[in-house]
Image: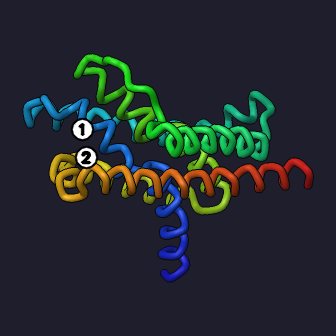
Amino acid sequence: MLDILQSFALTFVPLFVAMDAIGALPFLLPVTQDLEASQRTRVIRMAIVTALALGLGFVFIGKGILFVLDIKVADFLVAGGLILLLLAAKDLVTGRMFEGQAHAVAEAGVVPIGTPLITGPAVLTTLLLLIDQHSIIIVITSFVFNLLLTWLIFSQANRIAAFLGQGGVRATSKVASLFLAAIAIKMIRQGVLGILG
């Protein structure tokens, strides 16, 4: 039982950092602030469903795609780590990880909120790394719990933003980006060691 809890913690935390639901609030709020409650709920639900489908799809066929393309996990770790590092650095320097674009309300739940905001390169690469190290059931459970937590945070976005204040949301996002950069360096290191080994 203790091993299961430890594995859950070791998979939950990296996914939590990679998803960065609180850090996504500054992007989510402008998209949903003028919507009625029912519209906001629909957009958030669509985002979570999109993120879940993309993440689960990658867990089950990601390695198959890598096999067909003859890409080693170590290669993917280096590439994914570099992308994560660039995204984290961009957020730390410019204050935004992704460029905002005008999307219809109906599409906003899918793109950009569902992907790449919730399940983007950070989460997909982290999932690939975790399924190599832990039971797939534990990884999927951690992923689903993180999505539930993200849904809870997003559904309370206006209250959380008001509580943290604009500075608090920005500071939380920066700390999450710093952790994301550290995870990226770890992935690059593991990938390089895997290629050289």
The residue pinned by badge 2 equals 154
Please provide percent x and percent y for residue 116.
Answer: 45, 33
The amino acid marked with disc number 2 is Phe
Tell me if I can see residue 140 in this picture: no
Image point (69%, 57%), residue name: 186
Tell me if I can see residue 162 in this picture: yes
What scheme was used to colour the molecule? rainbow
The circle on residue 175 is none
Image point (69%, 53%), residue name: 185
Image point (48%, 75%), residue name: 5
- The residue closer to the viewer here, 20 or 152, is 20
Nearer the camera: disc 1 or disc 2:
1
First in sequence: mark 1 or mark 2? 1
Please provide percent x and percent y for residue 71.
Answer: 78, 35
Q: Quadrant of residue 51?
A: top left
121 lies above or below 110: below
The residue pinned by badge 1 equals 29
Q: Residues within 10 Å of mark 2 (few under 14, many from 20)?
A: many
Q: Quadrant of residue 115?
A: top left
The amino acid marked with disc number 1 is Leu
Disc 1 is placed on an element classified as helix
- The residue closer to the viewer here, 91 or 125, is 91
Image point (44%, 57%), residue name: 16
Please provide percent x and percent y for residue 169.
Answer: 32, 52
- The residue closer to the viewer here, 58 or 80, is 80
Q: Residues within 10 Å of mark 1 (few under 14, many from 20)?
A: some
107 lies above or below 91: above
186 lies above or below 87: below
> With 107 as the anchor, is 180 left or right in this view?
right
Quadrant where the C terminus is found in the figure = bottom right
> With 176 as the anchor, is 47 left or right in this view?
left
